[in-house]
Image (cartoon, grey):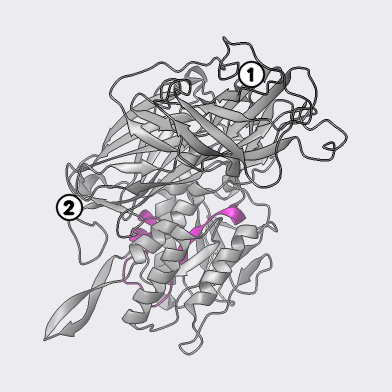
Amino acid sequence: MRKKLYFHHLLLGMAIFMGSCSENEDSIPANPGDAISFSAATPQSRTYYSEWLQLDWEEYDQIGIYSAEANALDADINKPKNAVYEITNIYKDEPGHYHHADFEAVGDDRLKWGSYNDHTFYGAYPAERIETYPNEGDMKGMFEMKYMTNQVCSVSSLTSPYKTTPDMKNAYMVAKNTLPPTSDKHVLLTFRPVMTTLQINVTAGSTGSDIGTGIIPGPTTITGVSVIMPRALNNGEFLYDVDNGYLKEGSVLDDTKESVFVSFNNNNGERYIKLNAEEKISFLVFLPPVLMDVSRGDTAKLRIHTTGYQNYVIPMNGNLQQEYKFDIKLPDFDPERIQPNNWMSYMDDKVYVSQLSIPGSYRNLQSIPAGNLLNMGVRALDLRSAGDEMNTIIEEIESFLGKNSQEFVIALCGDGSTVSSTKKIDFKADMTLAEARGSILFINENMSGITFNKDYSEDKYNENEAKYVIDNLRNNVSRAWTVTYCAYDNMPQDIVKSSNKAIYDHIVNTQEGNTGIVMIPYACTENVVGEPEAGKPQLFQTYGDLFTQSIIDCNFKFIHQFANK
């Protein structure tokens, strides 16, 4: 599927086209057992996802088709009632084929006429996202599609205003057609869009520059944007009722926050975009068609994910229409109005804390004060070597939580530590975010319910092992936390850089679930002063800022389980 840009607007028709390719002509009946030929009306003139985005079929696009009446003869009775078809021929200007595209079956499975009676066909695009086809039982007229909460836009221009190309496989479409068997005509399917499409235009404000600490980068580094919805799909199941034109009744949870995240991929393979003052980027987000009632406080929010000491959240004051455009002007950076990176505040109370992805700061490789780290999104502090500074750091944590009561902080202490706090609570496997907010969780390596990978020594550290541990956490259903050390004491700067970058690349390109607690060297830090060259100090890139934010972003990319509390 590809997109084209148009500057006129066509209202979306919700009716489903019914008929064959040449409805005005008499048809020759097909015989039961004959293969069914399919064709699609190209969405060029009928189906729009937004006023400027038009969908056209491309060769090899694949569609899933189901019919309860098909494959009914004895010879076909054990064959499935569904099959995958792909676009083979596209007719745009030929008489008799205007806006049509032919399908051919993929593989050996295909649909055949099952009788001389009417057949009803259901289609869905893209076929690869179909989890479950309709049936004549509890899935009558319904497709279950894979719910994509982690979307990627490719940056297609090198300068501002930056243009992007969305992954059109997130532009789900469905079709339905009922007609009698015909041998001389194709079964024509006209697809209509399912998703709510949000066009977001972001313009950067001016920022300060404090490159030496990496706290306030000059340009704004955007790693993605999340749309935080006030309602969620039950168990992450995207069940679409084609007959009625909306999500299955009862499949949406009220008063439950869930987000769809969009990240970027530019021409250099970088998974972020840097915007200087007044530079712009535009992109699309495809959202599930979840109804929101503004009158009862059902308001979606946009969160711009940036590295460092910034927090941009914009309420979307209005009901999301099927096509929606949103312009965002980021505020100028004002050091006196610093907004902490309070990412936990925008997550649902019912999420288990063990499902969270927590960025932590590794001991002995950090010079930024604890309070600043917390303001930049770090939520785990390695205090095993804090010594005489322990009480001071605990006071900084308490001060932070006093001002940011929707967050919580993990303090990793030595086995024999007796440090306490009025905000202390004990970890338990079924703890929810609501129970942890405003508190400090003191943990150590002897606690049950928490797995610690080994704290490496210089000759044992292996970044690939750290990536393996983090990757495997996507299958974690035991509600146990895992702490992964991505460093060792006195780690050389060149190894810090290569290790941080390798694990960061893994998280943004490969990770498909939560990361657990990840202890990062130089967390939140873009550059530090490195070894001098020719007698001059050199700035050394650590990737600590991007690494930290990539872990935070995981909390908004993937589907969570919700407690029934």
Residue 75 position (above or below residue 267): above
Taking the spot 32% from the left edge, 80% from the top edge, the residue there is 493
Query: Where does label 2 land, which residue?
Result: 208
User: What label sits on residue 244 in the rendered view?
Assistant: 1
Q: Quadrant of residue 304?
A: top left
Taking the spot 53% from the left edge, 26% from the top edge, the residue there is 191
Range of magenta residues: 353-382
Indicate the secondary structure of the residue bearing disc 2: loop
353 or 408: nearer the eye?
353
Taking the spot 64% from the left edge, 51% from the top edge, the residue there is 431
Q: Position of residue 41 (x, y in %)?
A: 50, 25
Identified by mark 2, the residue type is Gly
245 or 235: nearer the eye?
245
Whether residues under marks 1 and 2 lie with C-beta atoms below 8 angstroms apart, the answer is no
User: What label sits on residue 437 in the rendered view?
Assistant: none
Residue 315: tell me if it is visible. no
Quadrant the C terminus occupies:
top right
Q: Is residue 121 left or right of residue 545?
A: right
As for residue 364 lying within the magenta part, the answer is yes
Residue at the extreme right: 74
Identified by mark 1, the residue type is Asn
Indicate the secondary structure of the residue bearing disc 1: loop
Q: Quadrant of residue 132?
A: top right
